[in-house]
Image (cartoon, helix red, strand yellow):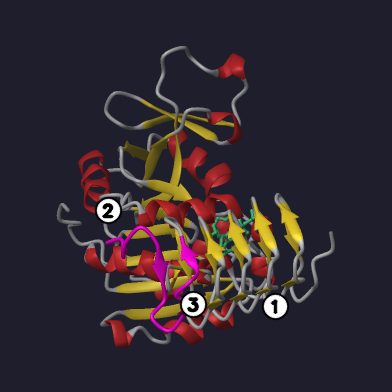
Amino acid sequence: MSDPRGVAQAVILVGGQGTRMRPLTDTMPKPMLPLLGLPFVERQVQHLARAGVRRIVFSCGYRPREIEEYFGDGSSRGLEMGYVVDPEPLGTAGAIANAESLLDGDGDVFVLNGDILTDLDLGALVAHHLALGAEATIALTPVEDPSAFGLVRTDPDGRVTEFVEKPGADELIPGEPYRINAGTYVLAPSARAAIPHGEQVSIERDTFPLLAARGGVGALGSGCYWRDIGTPQSYLDAHLDVLAGRVGFITPPGASWVADDAHVDPSAVIGDGASVGPGARVGAGATVGRCVIAGGARVGDGATVDGAVLGRDVVVGPGAQVTGLVVAGDGATVPDGMVLEGPATVATGSVASA
Ligand code: GTP
């Protein structure tokens, strides 16, 4: 990785409600959902620390306590960590403004959406930012179909010329690379000063267009790994990607992962792409395929789970068959012998009904 030349502080946006991840986010903020035994946001912290970041401010809103209790003041990781909590949802830019009091006001800062898994070269992003003398620099990622995203257009020097939110077919230029905002930025003090305090402001819709109009926004594309883990399918896919070794900075534990203190009966089959969390139990003759099983969950004797995301302490009864994208909140139960095909959701603490 290139030298990040002095960007030693970061804000991670972790305040969203994670509505698309319900019911998993009923009981835990999305950035704290585990990815192979570690909270997702811990992976981001590791990535930042490797790039030379020493101070991280978590910009919280929904369920802030879980995050602060887990990381504390950061000293056990050799980092400084601080927390701000939106008094009300402030939007992505308002939340950055709210974090300013804990930042070195003279320095540039990395800003990360707390739901992006990427092995982006942060040093290269900073180098581009400095070479352009930009106020803000956005990491871009390629997509095949930009219609659900915000398309970012640049000039040949890598300076943003246009943002097109959810472009229709008539707004696309044949042959152009479709690149979208990857949720990772470098912001100079002047960019942060452009955000009004105490108001709901979106960095994507309000701040970046304002700064781009004065030529202040750079953007850098790359072919790095990138995934927004904001939906259950994408969260499951992130596990599969890590297990397949596609995420540069995470060494896969193997084709599947079973936590050290999980108990898997010797007659059970754990397939490639399975993640079985701490304290989970998989019974005799059970089959576990590509799925995420959180800590404390139980898969009964002879049951099958494949394609599902099961929260903490979920119970799948003996002989049950759970296939496809079944998302079960913490403490949910799939009764003995039930056949449950996704897509389906089982609410937190409830019993699935056929
Ligand atoms: P959905 O409700 O499913 O759209 O998820 P979300 O609430 O996480 O929203 P989204 O995925 O658009 O947010 C992107 C990132 O910004 C996530 O890491 C959120 O935690 C964070 N975020 C979004 N809105 C706010 C906000 O108002 N305040 C703070 N502090 N963070 C926010």
Q: What amino acid is labelled 2 in the image?
A: Gly
Regarding residue 273, the answer to whether it shows in the image is: yes
Name the front one of labels 1 and 3.
Answer: 3
Distance from disc 2 to disc 3, alpha carbons, whole Å, reads 32 Å
* Upstream in sequence: badge 2 or badge 3: 2
Q: Residue at x 30, y 64 (%)?
A: 48
Residue 333 in percent (x, y) is at: 74, 73
Considering depth in this image, is 108 or 329 the residue closer to the camera?
Answer: 329
Helix, strand or loop status at disc 1? loop
Q: Relative to residue 229, is residue 206 depicted above or below?
A: above
Q: Residue at x 58, y 53 (%)?
A: 307
On the rendered structure, is 242 left or right of 99? left
Q: Quadrant of residue 323?
A: bottom right
Residue 310 in percent (x, y) is at: 62, 67
Is the Cβ of the residue at disc 1 closer than 8 Å to that at disc 2?
no
Regarding residue 231, the answer to whether it shows in the image is: no
Q: Relative to residue 84, is residue 186 depicted above or below?
A: above
Which residue is the site of mark 3? 265
Q: What amino acid is labelled 1 in the image?
A: Gly
Q: Which mark is residue 331?
A: 1
Magenta stretch encompasses residue 154? no
On the rendered structure, is 12 left or right of 149? left
Image quadrant in which the C terminus is located = bottom right
Which residue is the site of mark 2? 248
Residue 284 in percent (x, y) is at: 55, 74
Helix, strand or loop status at disc 3? loop
